[in-house]
Amino acid sequence: MVIVMLPGAEPDDVDAVVDRVEGAGGQAFVSRGLSRVIIGLIGDVELFESLNLSGMPGVGQVTRVSTEYKLVSREQHPDRSVVHVRGVPIGPGTVTLIAGPCAVETPEQTLAAARMAQASGATMLRGGAFKPRTSPYAFQGLGELGLRILADVREETGLPVVTEVVSAHDVDMVAEYADMLQIGTRNMQNFALLQAIGEARVPVMLKRGMNSTIQEWLMAAEYIAQRGNLEIVLCERGIRTFETATRNTLDVSAVPVVQRLSHLPVIVDPSHSGGSRDLVIPLSRAGIVAGADGIIVDVHPEPEAALCDGPQALVREDLDQLALSVAELTAFMRRQPARRRYSSAS
Amino acid sequence: MVIVMLPGAEPDDVDAVVDRVEGAGGQAFVSRGLSRVIIGLIGDVELFESLNLSGMPGVGQVTRVSTEYKLVSREQHPDRSVVHVRGVPIGPGTVTLIAGPCAVETPEQTLAAARMAQASGATMLRGGAFKPRTSPYAFQGLGELGLRILADVREETGLPVVTEVVSAHDVDMVAEYADMLQIGTRNMQNFALLQAIGEARVPVMLKRGMNSTIQEWLMAAEYIAQRGNLEIVLCERGIRTFETATRNTLDVSAVPVVQRLSHLPVIVDPSHSGGSRDLVIPLSRAGIVAGADGIIVDVHPEPEAALCDGPQALVREDLDQLALSVAELTAFMRRQPARRRYSSAS
Amino acid sequence: MVIVMLPGAEPDDVDAVVDRVEGAGGQAFVSRGLSRVIIGLIGDVELFESLNLSGMPGVGQVTRVSTEYKLVSREQHPDRSVVHVRGVPIGPGTVTLIAGPCAVETPEQTLAAARMAQASGATMLRGGAFKPRTSPYAFQGLGELGLRILADVREETGLPVVTEVVSAHDVDMVAEYADMLQIGTRNMQNFALLQAIGEARVPVMLKRGMNSTIQEWLMAAEYIAQRGNLEIVLCERGIRTFETATRNTLDVSAVPVVQRLSHLPVIVDPSHSGGSRDLVIPLSRAGIVAGADGIIVDVHPEPEAALCDGPQALVREDLDQLALSVAELTAFMRRQPARRRYSSAS
Amino acid sequence: MVIVMLPGAEPDDVDAVVDRVEGAGGQAFVSRGLSRVIIGLIGDVELFESLNLSGMPGVGQVTRVSTEYKLVSREQHPDRSVVHVRGVPIGPGTVTLIAGPCAVETPEQTLAAARMAQASGATMLRGGAFKPRTSPYAFQGLGELGLRILADVREETGLPVVTEVVSAHDVDMVAEYADMLQIGTRNMQNFALLQAIGEARVPVMLKRGMNSTIQEWLMAAEYIAQRGNLEIVLCERGIRTFETATRNTLDVSAVPVVQRLSHLPVIVDPSHSGGSRDLVIPLSRAGIVAGADGIIVDVHPEPEAALCDGPQALVREDLDQLALSVAELTAFMRRQPARRRYSSAS
């Protein structure tokens, strides 16, 4: 059962609902978005219906839901959401380009990549300081040092930063440096991490597990939402199939399917799905016209020297083509480029 | 080993090469395209190199190739090919829209669907008379009666016809009615059928096996080419993955990957991959901007009454949006719409 | 709707049922097994129920079935079936070992492999004369010459022969030489071939498509049964997954699942699923204790010289271990080894 | 590069090697097993070879390895390992049966399940207190209360306990109650958790990610080994494929493949792979004869009332058949049942 509070509901109104539910032996999970509060209830639905919740102050709508995800479902929330990252919107009216290096290696490399990102029209910077790697002998990232480099480059360029967090223990620390936290494909069902981020007050990008169904992905988002954080952007990054010609298979159909099921924004990562540089621009285009709310790509000033995923990074020669494709196809989709609209403390 | 003959090579030149190869115990497969002849050799490569084939009249280039497909490879044939179907081009300069009913049911339904196809800008008609169905209790198509309906509708509308053939035994019969033969996903490795079509002189659309790698798909095309037919168009139609939210997963990356490996045109079928009507237009767009040389879609005047795959057929209300998307994105790709340029006896 | 005729029903009784069904606008498919006749009806079930079919002479049971396969379903036929191949049983009371070379290469190699097969306890010989190969440049088999070799080796050893047929056109010719026809994994949905074999009066081994669900596999068997041939043995041979350490992934669970759904015997092919010699014996064991009615393995006198799949063939040193495993585990399963019980003209 | 220390090597010997490697700018990871110490080196191999490590006291063998997993590889350690859990061996000489409830619900249910486990010959108890569930609205386990129940039941029955840990933060707490920690399929690439368990001194059962290759699985084990814990048992529990007739597809081939590549013991979980009760015994048998070092199954006194995975739990009527199958097939494999040989403080 889900309760959508009215726009002007007071904190006391929310508390009163929670008290009544818990007094009846149920559990209530409060999720606060920018413009609304949603309360998810777990327990005996028959009992809840006897509590007259819809008559309480501040309560908008009370609904029984049948899907296994409630707070992120479009059923209760037909308007698609916009998530703002330090003023940069990600959502239905815009196409947001996010670019940067796969891994932060040095201040120089990171700044150079950020300048490349801006040159191609990007308004957000990506970069990994904590890298979950299949092999324990591969480069695992610079850790907190990498986060400091990212924060410095944000100072320099004005680009908000998204970066991965790999452990519940690190969430607060990473959130001090970054504007948006990324949950990587291997951690999509790391429920302890999902819950820790659910309790943080920071936007999150949830990558699809490379082997997860769309339903499992939305349930993972629900774990975050249930703890109170609705500032979630989904990211399709390719799934594992029998095909070996590409690293993973970009499931471009997931974009319209997710938008039918959920109000959350969804973007596409063409770099990690294809795994090769010459696929990035075709797949970026495909993502945009399938309806994606943004694109996240790897760029690197010197891919042949990259410590991580060099073969898939775009280089300077690619930037004009990327910028042109994003601009033309954003117009084709009757959307705007995503510009930073205001500064937030975030 | 592959021999590319010069443009002006005589039939006798080709025969002479074949004789010399066979005289040395090898096998020679001659493939005739519109503008060139290619001869593939099987046997002892060292021996072939001692035969001085490159000095023979009409011989252009002699090359050792390492891939398992030779005649369809782009290595020997860097320019991407154009296949003409009764004057309608499918290839790098154009985007060809093919539309029609999944199955031919009645003359009226087929004509109505063809008119819908034309209204959306299609210049070729699709329609199934022989339907390979998973269940023996499902509608299997009208057979030759369906072919006659298709030929009548071609008379009426001028649209060249592509239709599926499911058995080597039927190839000649189907080729009498159709302008292009389709090999369906379940028959991609029906080698007897591939070889029979290789011996026919008619363009062919080879759908990717829903569980086949790109390499296996190109080797299936090689079976056709090896028997002499290079008028092959590949069609990506979705692969089988663990995801159940869509019927299959459209592998849009396959378009640029195939174009890197092979000179053959490649088109996309968004109807059968997604399996639902609301995915057809987003996936059509995605296919075009990924570089597809065409799109093939199901349309039906009354999908709720369709005998086959009704839920995925576009209806009249969708046509304007389809036509607009194809037109705008064809321009974005700096291509032309594929108009019928001349009449051929096919 | 399915009609099971009584054991002593006359041909005239069957004809009468067919006439009544067709007279009412329905279709009737007659399948003749060794001990029973089953008639599958397609059309308007309500109408059929008004025809009083159950009161007609020779009619045993009339049932509405809900699955998409009827004749092969266990619902109508709770006792699991036994298929006899020239007197060798394959079914619930026995474990049948079938062995031989992947491809027939020479009379000497085939006879040597057959002797190896016998030494390990095999009572049937496998061997390929028509080889469907992914690459058109790979060895495609000896064709009819290979069939003649197999027939000669059967003379010599007394082992009934199972061999693959790849085209509807070849069914009669192959059936003249072989005791059992094999439909390979790539042809599981070659419906023209299924129907042609359905009309032949010869036992068939239907391999699972490497990408086919169990339900699709049973529907493919239904295509054969529908045309009148119920002498079908299913063969699990591994499915395609993301794992690359083995050629395919043996789906050993398919054995009990199939036996729950269908009355047809099911055997396991550990050679083609694993693709490597050292996996053959562990997977053979696994198949038997999961309940398989038999095992089919590749053996070769000189695998390093094999023209096809040498790396997976068992060699002489493996035979004792294979024989011992099959014998001990057949006893563990409270079954008998499958000995030839009588000679049939087959 | 990997250094295997001699059995009698002193701690000082190990420290000296580490100092020399780190002094040269390399990294050294020390793994302590019961009977040996292995040191994995990361850095410049050429440099390491100049350090004369093989001449240092206590050093047994120094080897360059090419695989991406070193410490768990069989290359350096040809004898397969035995892991002891409070005196119960898991390894090549025995077949260990582990049984218990999917989730700990009440003291009574847990004790009843443990008694069932013992009746079927089990010498270890499984039971979940922390349950990672796809849906946030599903039962998530009793947490520490569940651990206390497990510890009480161990008191009562003498069965060592294996239970799942889902967060790096909980490792020490869970290790206080349990004899073996389980890493579940969704956490196989939760590298923070792997590393935390690597630093604990407690045996671990690492389930295969349902979408992970065998190579990725061994690299996950390497993460644990690299931090010093070699008491690792691998558990195959089914992989995700296109087949929907079973919950997952048990990859029984993984057992011999893993044993060829790694010295670690490997067991099979037939309950979670098949997802249905009637598959558990056939798949248990298949696992044992494929060479598994043990089997882990769900049992429940009242499956219809279970809070988690009831449909796959064995009930009392199944126990005799399970016990018989395990006993007979353990003998067939020339192994012993795994009895507790000594008491350890663990």
Image (cartoon, coloured by chain):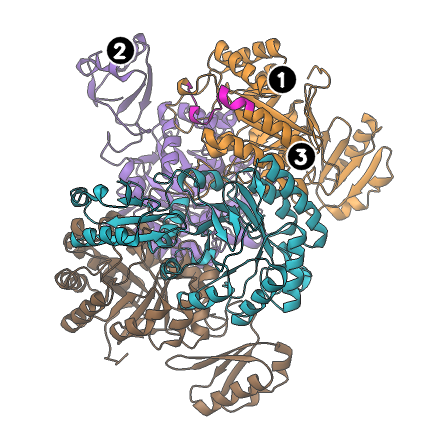
Chain colours: A brown, B purple, C orange, D cyan
Is residue C315 in the magenta section? yes
- The span shown in magenta is C306-320
Circle 1: residue type: Pro
Label annotation for residue B16 = 2
Q: Which residue corresponds to the image point at 60% horizontal and 9% vertical from the top-left? A: C156
> Mark 2 and mark 3: span between their CA atoms?
66 Å
- Check chain identity for marks 2 and 1: say if they share one: no
Nearer to us: label 2 or label 3: 3
Circle 2: residue type: Ala
Q: Is residue D301 above or below residue D219?
A: below
Label annotation for residue B9 = none
Q: Secondary structure at mark 3?
A: helix
Q: Is residue A95 above or below residue B272?
A: below
The chain letter under disc 1 is: C
* Residue C225 horizontal side relative to residue B319, left or right: right
| Local crowd size for mark 2, using a 10 Å CA cut-off: few (<14), some (14–19), many (≥20) | some
Label annotation for residue C332 = 3
The quarter in which the C terminus of chain B is drawn is top left
Q: Disc 2, disc 1: CB below 8 Å?
A: no
